[in-house]
Image (spheres, rainbow, N blue to C red):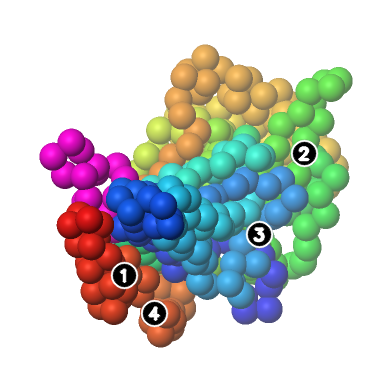
Amino acid sequence: MAESNFIDYVKILCRSGKGGAGSRHFHRAKYVPKGGPDGGDGGRGGHIILKGSRHLWTLLPLRYQRHVFATDGQRGGAGRSFGKDGEDRIIEVPVGTAVFDAETGEFITEITEDGQEIKLLRGGKGGLGNWHFATSTNRAPRYAQPGQPAIEKAVILELKLLGDVGLVGFPNAGKSTLLSAMSAARPKIADYPFTTMEPSLGIVNYRGDKSFVMADIPGIIEGASEGKGIGLRFLRHIERNAVLLFLIPADSDDIKRDYDILLRELTEFNPELADKSRVLAISKSDLLDDELREEISKELPEGIPSVFISAVTGQGLTELKDLLWREINSEENLAKSTMTHRNLDVRHRVEEEDEFIFHQDDDAEEELPLDDEDWEDEFWDEEDQVNG
């Protein structure tokens, strides 16, 4: 997996900019001995902004950019001059990216549309200059507001592919073959387990100009929700699907048992997946005669729409498309939210990412409103003006 360019889980450290301090300056001019306060406001710190981009399909760029820091706002100046705002940092991510707090695992937000922007961390506000605090009884305020501090947070970004139908099955169940037969996608197909090492999408054309998106993930084995195999790492992509297509080969010893195992692994990963619409397809049905098909039909799970198919011969594919399209557009399914998120726990984390150590740059000198020498000079200048 280390050689794959498909990165769907990454941990980064973000920090917004701190606000600039307000100025405590007093107006100085040759013929204006008591010019009064004219310290300007500090600039705001830069924001950390997430932006969706349809041109990205992986989180790979963030694998090599672990620190995303916005710049600080500058302090205010004389003559009520405002300090410059800090520069925002925009993090472009693929559509379908969810954000979690790296410490607590709590879900924060998600990007679902191209061009969508969300402020992940807000920059600190700049402090007010001393001219704001001048009153009839306090004409020479010697104080100004400091800028608000920066916000620092480690976050985990998870990419969840946006698909209408998610393929669920054991290794070598024929998921990749079905995807290649129903769409223009060309996933790797071979006769050994776990041929599919990363998710893939395919657009399925349906009756004219209609279409839907089908997603294929690596095969799931019993115990995947506990970390066995590689299915657990990619189960997050199923959370985005509106309909789950369970694919079980016709030569299975017990189709109902295999279906129950797959469903149990999904619900242990995320209990809310049990509420999604489900369809059962019996693949490799070209190996069956009419008598065997009738016997298998009696043992199928009840209450789940099913169809016998063969990706090689094309048998049942049209019926499968009709069934999937009906489930995708059913009133019950449209009423449900297809965006299902769960907070991260130990099972949902990627170990090498979770143990990543951030080396922060703490050598940057903290910006202060005034150092001791400036403060002393300012104090005496103010006293001179107050006393004439």
Q: CA distance from mark 1 to mark 2?
A: 61 Å
- Name the front one of labels 1 and 4: 1
**Which residue position is annotated with label 4?**
365
Visible in this render: residue 76?
A: no
Q: CA distance from mark 4 to mark 2?
A: 53 Å
Magenta span dominant secondary structure: loop
First along the sequence among labels 4 and 3: 3
Number of the label disc, if any, that sits on residue 370: 1
Q: Residue 214 in the image: x percent, y percent? A: 68, 41
Front of the two marks 3 and 2: 3
Is 141 part of what is drawn in magenta?
yes
Residue 203 disc label: 2
Residue 89 position within the rendered picture, expressed as x and y whole percent measured from the top left: 56, 58
Q: 242 left or right of 73? A: right
Residue at 58% over, 24% down: 327
**Callout 1: helix, strand or loop?**
loop
Where residue 50 appears, as percent x and y from the top left, is 54, 50
Q: Confirm or deny contact between disc 1 and disc 3 (CB under 8 A).
A: no
Q: Secondary structure at mark 3?
A: loop
Left-right relation of 39 to 134: right
On the rendered structure, is 136 left or right of 84?
left
Front-most of residues 125 and 357 = 125
- Foreground: disc 4 or disc 3: 4
Q: Nearer the viewer, mark 1 or mark 2?
A: 1
Label 4, label 3: how far apart the Cα atoms are:
36 Å
Three-letter amino acid code of the residue under disc 3: Thr
**Residue holding disc 3:** 58
Amino acid type shown at disc 4: Glu
Residue range in magenta is 124-146
